[in-house]
Amino acid sequence: MRTALGIVFVMYLGLFGTQAKAQNAAYPNVPAVIEARVNAAVKDIAAAVARKAEDRDVAAPIGSVWNDLILYTFAHAVAPDNAKVTIRNLTVYRYLGETARTDKQQGSVPAGTGSTTLVEKAGLTTFLGYAIEHGAIQESVSGSTVTLRGSPYGLFSLASGGDTPENYENYGLWRRINGSASFNIENPSQPLQSVNQKQLANYSISAGIYGDRSTRSKRFQKRWKEKYDPAIVRRLGVLSEGESRVFNDLLAADPEVFRRLRSVRAKLEQDVVDYCKGKTELTDADKQVLADKYLHVLYDTIYDPIRTSDVSKKQDVPAGVRDYLNNTVVPSLISAHEALEQAQKDLDADLAEFNKQPLLTFEYTNQRQAVVSGYSEFKLLFDGKIAPLNITANAGISFYNTPNRSLNQSKTRDFFGSLELQGSSKNPFRMNLKDLSKVTYSLSSRLERMKETRLNVAVVQVKVEIPVATALSLPLSFSYANHTELIKEKEIKGHFGLTLDLDKLFAITRNLEKP
Amino acid sequence: MTQPDPLDPYDYDVTKAESVQFIITTQGTAPHIHLVLDGKPLPPPYVFPVTKPKPQIHVVASEFNFDPGVPSSAYYDIRLTGSLGGNFSVPRITPDSAVKDPGFSFGVIAP
């Protein structure tokens, strides 16, 4: 019996940065919500420049946020100096779902893998390029392998209007079948040219038997409509009603006000188009120049004329508009944003719960190995939750494609099964009541019988991870194996270490820096 | 319906009693489309009559959300048509768009 004790130190390094907050010269004391809106428009301008869009599409983002910025700037300008609730209290809006789960649905693969003998190669490459461009097939390159993923649904919908909500509904069965194929790349500059039978490394087909975790499923859509749509509509309602009433009241007091604003906006749009002319991408400095141009316009045209003490430049805002902005629009917007922030948290929790629905999948994989014998694997995979534990279980059997009798291989290669149980509980070492960190624990086991070696291999691992301080945790694990692949001996291993999560640490630091 | 500023596809001139329709094509996501006209939700088929007198303005706030995790090839294409003429397109909204809630204004110019 051998024993081993290892020490593992794991550090999660992430991209992080500190944001020095300086006074904006174009619009001193600019509210965060105005700056964020301008930056969003500039980001879309940069994207339009990068895709070499027409002048209209380069300038369009200015107009897309114009109404909101006019409203926000008026609200900022008319806020009393001693007001406790102003547009400055309005948090920057994040679209629901944008920060939520980012893992993509399991991709699928064109069913026609390995069928290149039936299709002319040039035609296949053209077709693949078209299908990838239209999202019917996903391509990923990793090292010297190109992998294509897709589903019959992607191909069927490609021929009938694309991935529309109607096709998604009509071709439900085909959505449950996915496949992927990996090819060894011959020419790194043209990975798709390697898509042929000779370069095929492996392919797999999977079929969902039970469960649907797609956020496009009827069940999730129903929840979204009932729970999240009202919060979105509430904010839009405040904005559109506020803008409609404020703009029309301003027009009643000064019928020329919007003609003047349109003229200023048109000048800004042309200015932006001229600035971007000839550029193929915008640097950060370019984006700042454009953001400053926008902020200058808002400050010089709206904020300063309302706030100035210079009577010759002073612009009056009707008392009714001031009261409406200060007492109705701004408090309602703040309240609507708070509701959306809560909705975002609820959505994250809903998605986490949704992602634990039972899922049963059948998977077939064909490993085509040049050096050792290739084999086919049939697996059933189960993933679900039986409170309080998450359960993952696999069982399968594999067969050699062409058994090598000299290596003692028969048609059946092996049988295998695995089970993992995961759970978490309150951290007994937590620093304070706000500390929500949890102790996580898991038990995993795998049983395998290799026919040619006649070995039954059993491996069991127990792992516990205990948070000991902010962003710092202590993982402990013990594993037991009755054999290893090379040695017919029992093996017991123990590991412990420290995990420092720098992303979490700097997220906390950034939050502390916020005013 | 006309577009007075050729560089701004979010600002239109309309005539009283004219009908304006948003025609929206969805790809790669469930349709999370929200249009709100002057404070009131505008349901499918996203049509509204111009009811305000000259020189007032109708405002439509919109938002186009995507299901979490959709591919970047998903999109919304938006076109606007007026019953007295005019057919305009708005830049495509994708999961990568920074602005997914453009605001539209419709200034009444006649009668």
Image (spheres, coloured by chain):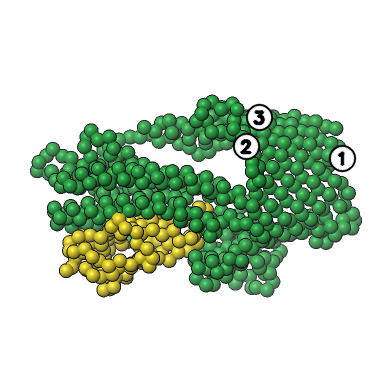
Which image quadrant: the N terminus of chain A? top right
Quick one: label 3 or label 2, which is nearer the N terminus? 2
A474 vs A293, left or right, is right
Instruction: Judge left or right: residue B81 versus residue A224.
Output: left
Q: How many other residues sit within 10 Å of disc 1, few (<14), some (14-19) or many (≥20)? A: few
Q: Are marks 1 and 3 on the same chain?
A: yes
Tell me the shade of chain A.
Answer: green
Label 1 sits on a secondary structure element that is loop
| Chain letter of the residue beneath label 1 in the structure image | A
**SS of the residue at dot 2?**
strand
Q: Quadrant of the C terminus of chain A?
A: top left
Q: Label 1 belongs to which residue?
A: A488
Please tell me whether mark 3 sits on a helix, a strand or a loop.
strand
The tag earlier along the polypeptide, 1 or 3, is: 1
**Residue marked by disc 3:** A497
From the viewer's perspective, is residue A227 above or below residue A32? below
How far apart, in angstroms, are the residues tagged by discs 3 and 2? 19 Å
User: What residue is pinned by disc 2?
Assistant: A424
Q: Amino acid at mark 1?
A: Lys
- Looking at the image, which residue is at 52% across and 36% down? A503
Q: Is residue A59 visible?
A: no
* For discs 2 and 1, the disc positioned in front in the rendered view: 2
Please, what is the three-letter code of the amino acid marked with disc 2? Ser
- Residue displayed at 31% across by 58% down: B40
Specify whether disc 2 shares its chain with disc 1: yes
